[in-house]
Image (tube, rainbow, N blue to C red):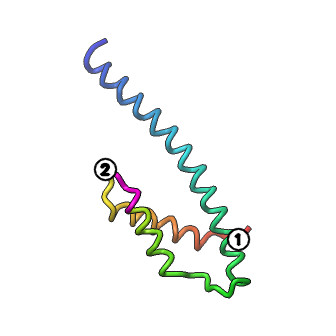
Amino acid sequence: MTEDNAAFAEIQKHRDQIDEIDRELVALLNKRAGHSLVIRGLKPDAQMGLYDAKREEEIFEKVASYNEGPLYNEYLREIYATILKVSKETPSL
């Protein structure tokens, strides 16, 4: 195998692993969204507003505490801000 073919094979190996991780991430994001929708449905009975800025900050802080890199905390915050935004916009079940 030439060096170019070895590099191509290595790239493909990593792409296959990324594809598997993406499959797992989609499943986990949908699982997370399901819990979020249940919480949204329960909030009125708990006399809670739909938006909780304090809870969002707690989420950002927890995510940062889990971070071991190579992503910077501010990038994870952007990702989670988008996840939270989409969760708020997702129609109830």
| Residue 5: quadrant of the picture | top left
Residue 61 at x, y percent in the picture: 40, 68
The one of 31 and 55 positioned closer to us in this rendering: 55
Q: Please, is residue 3 above or below residue 25 in the view? A: above
Other-residue count near label 1 (Cα within 10 Å), few / some / many at <14 / 14–19 / ≥20: few
Asked if residue 33 is among those painted magenta in the image, a careful observer would answer no
Q: Is residue 29 left or right of residue 2?
A: right
Other-residue count near label 2 (Cα within 10 Å), few / some / many at <14 / 14–19 / ≥20: few
The one of 20 and 58 positioned closer to us in this rendering: 58
The one of 54 and 4 positioned closer to us in this rendering: 54
Residue 25 at x, y percent in the picture: 53, 49
Q: Gap between marks 2 and 1, in whole Å?
A: 35 Å
- Identify residue type, mark 2: Pro
Residue 37 at x, y percent in the picture: 67, 69
Residue range corresponding to the magenta coloring? 65-70
Q: Is residue 7 left or right of residue 24?
A: left
Mark 2 or mark 1: whose residue is earlier in sequence? 2
Q: Which residue does the image show at 39% across and 66% down from the upper left?
A: 77
Q: Which residue does the image show at 44% across and 75% down from the upper left?
A: 57
Q: Which residue does the image show at 70% across and 71% down from the upper left?
A: 92
Residue designated by label 1? 92
Q: Please, is residue 54 above or below residue 93 in the view? A: below
| Residue 39: quadrant of the picture | bottom right
Q: Is residue 88 left or right of residue 68?
A: right
Residue designated by label 2? 70
Q: Tell me whether the residue at label 2 lies in contact with that at label 1, contact meaning CB atoms closer than 8 angstroms.
A: no
In terms of secondary structure, what is the magenta stretch mainly?
A: loop
Quadrant in the picture for the C terminus? bottom right
Residue 31 at x, y percent in the picture: 63, 56
Quadrant in the picture for the N terminus? top left
Q: Is residue 68 left or right of residue 52?
A: left
Q: Please, is residue 36 above or below residue 30 in the view? A: below
